[in-house]
Amino acid sequence: MGKLRSRLGHTLREAGVIHSHVDGFTASQQQQLQELMAPVEQQLAQLEEQLAGPELDILDSYCAATPSAQTAIDIFAGEWASEFPPPLSGVRAGDAPLFAIEHVPWGVEVLGGVRGQRVVELGPLEGGHTYLLDRMGAAEVVAIEANTRAFLKCLVSKELLGIPSARFLCGDALRYLESELARGAAKFDFCLASGVLYHFLNPVAALDLMTRASDRLLLWTMYYDEDYIRSREDLSVKFPKATAMEYDGYAHTLYRQEYQQSLDYKGFCGGSAASSAWMTRSDILGALDHFGFDVVDIAFEEQNHKGNGPCFCVAAKRRGT
Ligand SMILES: C[S@@+](CC[C@H](N)C(=O)[O-])C[C@H]1O[C@@H](n2cnc3c(N)ncnc32)[C@H](O)[C@@H]1O
C-alpha cells in the first residue's frame, strides 16, 4: 500500500496537483491524499480478500458424529468412484465395482498368481484393486497414486477394510519406477497397470518402465480407434491431433486426448496434465513386443466402455520367462 501511495504522490506531483516530495506533504495535502486513497485502499482490501478465498473455519474440519465407516468415507463425500465390498457394502460411497472387478483376478490367474509375491500397482485410485491383490495373497503391494485426494481415499480404504500388504505411496508412479530402476532395485514379481496407460503423456515410455520393473504385466487400458472415435462427435472433439512419434526406435502414433470439462470434477481420476496421449490397440501390442513381452491372453474387449470408447485387458510376460 505504501508503494501505491508513493506512486500516486509521484503522479500527482507530475500532474502539478501537488508540488512537494511525497514525504514532504503538508497536513492538508496529506488529508487530500488520504481522501483520494480511501476508496482505492478499500477496493484493494476487497480484492485481497477475494484472492485469499473464503476464510478457513477449522471447526468445519471436525466430525461430531459417532465414529463409523461412513464418517471416514464422508471426508470425501461425493468424490468416491468405488462401491465398498462386504462388510461395508451398506456404506454410501460410489457405485463402480472396483473392489470386485473381474479383470484383476482373471489376469493374476492367467499370469500364474501373486501369492507371496511383490506387486507394483500404478494409480490405485481408492485401493479397490490393491484390496483384491491383497486377498489373492500378495506379500506386498506397492501402490503409487499421484492424485493426493485419491491417495488419502486409499488410506481410508486401507483403514476400513484392512489391506495389510498395501503400501500406498503418494506421487508419480513413473517417477517411482524410474528411481527404483536407477538405484538398481530388485524387479517386482508382477505389475498392475489398470486404467492408467491412457492418462500418460508418453505411454510408450511408461510401457518401457513397466516392462523393465517387472517380467509380468497386467494392462487394462482404453485405446484409440479412429473409426469409432470419429463416429462420435462428443468423443471426436476431445482428440484434436495425431502425432507420429518414435521412442527407443519404436515408431507409433500418439493421439492427444483433452480432459476438458472432466477437470471440473473433484473426483477426477485422470492424469496430472490437462491432456494425455492415447495409442491404437495395435501400437500398444507392438510396443509390448518391442520391449520383449509376449501376450499371454487378451480379454474384456469393449467397444464403448462407460461411453468413453474402446478398451481391452492384456496379460503379458517377458519372452522366455
Ligand atoms: C482411471 S483411474 C484407474 C483406477 C484403477 N487403477 C482402476 O483401474 O480402476 C486412474 C488412476 O491413476 C492415477 N494416476 C494418473 N496418473 C498417475 C501417475 N502419473 N502416477 C500415479 N497415479 C496416476 C489417477 O489419479 C487415478 O487414481
Image: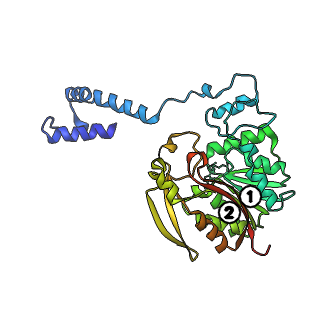
Q: Is residue 121 above or below residue 26?
A: below
Residue under pointer 2: 177
- Amino acid bearing label 2: Leu
| Location of the C terminus (image quadrant) | bottom right
Looking at the rendered image, the quarter that the N terminus falls into is top left
**Disc 1/disc 2 C-alpha distance (Å):** 9 Å
Mark whose residue sits in front, 1 or 2: 1
In the rendered structure, which amino acid carries the disc numbered 1? Val
The reply, left or right, for residue 187 in relation to residue 301 is right
**For mark 2, does the 10 Å Cα neighbourhood hold few (<14), some (14 to 19), or many (20 or more) residues?**
many
- Which label number is shown at residue 120? 1
Residue 172 visible in the displayed image: no
- Disc with the residue nearer the chain's start (1 vs 2): 1
Q: Is residue 10 above or below residue 188?
A: above
Please state the horizontal and vertical placement of residue 313, each as a whole percent of the image.
68, 57
The reply to whether callout 1 and callout 2 are in contact (CB within 8 Å) is yes
Residue at coordinates 78% horizontally, 46% vertically from top-left? 131
Q: Residue 16, located in which quarter of the rendered image? A: top left
Q: Which mark is residue 10?
A: none
Q: Is residue 176 visible?
A: yes
Where in the figure is residue 55, as x and y percent of width and height?
A: 51, 29
What kind of element bears circle 1? strand
Instruction: Name the residue rendered at 61%, 37% in the picture.
Output: 79
Indicate the position of residue 291 as horizontal and vertical percent values.
66, 73
